[in-house]
Image: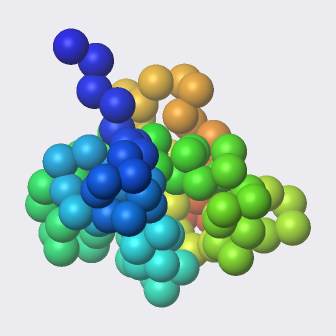
Amino acid sequence: MTIKWVQVDPLVMNGEPFCYGSRLTVRQLLEMRRSGYDLTRILTDQPELRRLGIAFAYCYAADHPERYAEFLRPDGSLTGPGFSESESAGLPPELQRPGVVIDPGAAVIRG
């Protein structure tokens, strides 16, 4: 079975796109990101989410600029912190989008 990480159902959440396995809409996730929530904080506050699902939600938002224009910069990148390079490791290549999923300015922590 393939999981559809962002789902749209007119009978769920008033038709607002939402993240699989949660009651968190893509818009709510983007509001958290714009408020400064990084991946670690989102996953801490919303443990039902998965890294892959968050990446899909960010890409979904970037691919629907008419719906999420308030969260997009003029260059098409999303406002707020995204994944660091290390956090994006292991994501499918189509999700490793700079400015959408990956935050080019995120600090890389080396151990």
Location of the N terminus by quadrant is: top left
Residue visible at 70% across and 76% down? Answer: 70
Image x and y of residue 60, in percent: 56, 46
In the displayed structure, 34 sits above or below 109; it is: below
Q: Position of residue 18 (x, y in %)?
A: 36, 55
Residue positioned 65% across, 72% down in the render = 71
The residue drawn where x is 48% and y is 78% is 31
Q: Is residue 29 placed above or below 108 in the rendered structure?
A: below
Considering every residue shown, the one lying at the far bottom of the view is 35
Residue 61 position within the rendered picture, expressed as x and y whole percent measured from the top left: 59, 54
Residue closer to the observer: 75 or 30: 30
Residue at x 41% of width, y 31% of height: 91
* 60 relative to 83 in the view: left or right: right
Task: Identify the image quadrant of residue 46.
Answer: bottom left
Residue 60 shows in the view: yes
Please say whether residue 33 is visible from this viewpoint. no
Q: Residue furthest right?
A: 74
Closest to the observer: 105 or 99? Answer: 99
**In the image as oriented, which residue stretches furthest toward the left?**
47
Quadrant for residue 88, please give it.
top left
Color theme of the render: rainbow
How many badges with numbers are in the image? 0
- Is residue 20 placed above or below 74 in the rendered structure? above
Which residue lies most toward the top here? 1
Percent of width and height locating residue 51? 30, 46
Seen in the image, is 2 located left or right of residue 55?
left
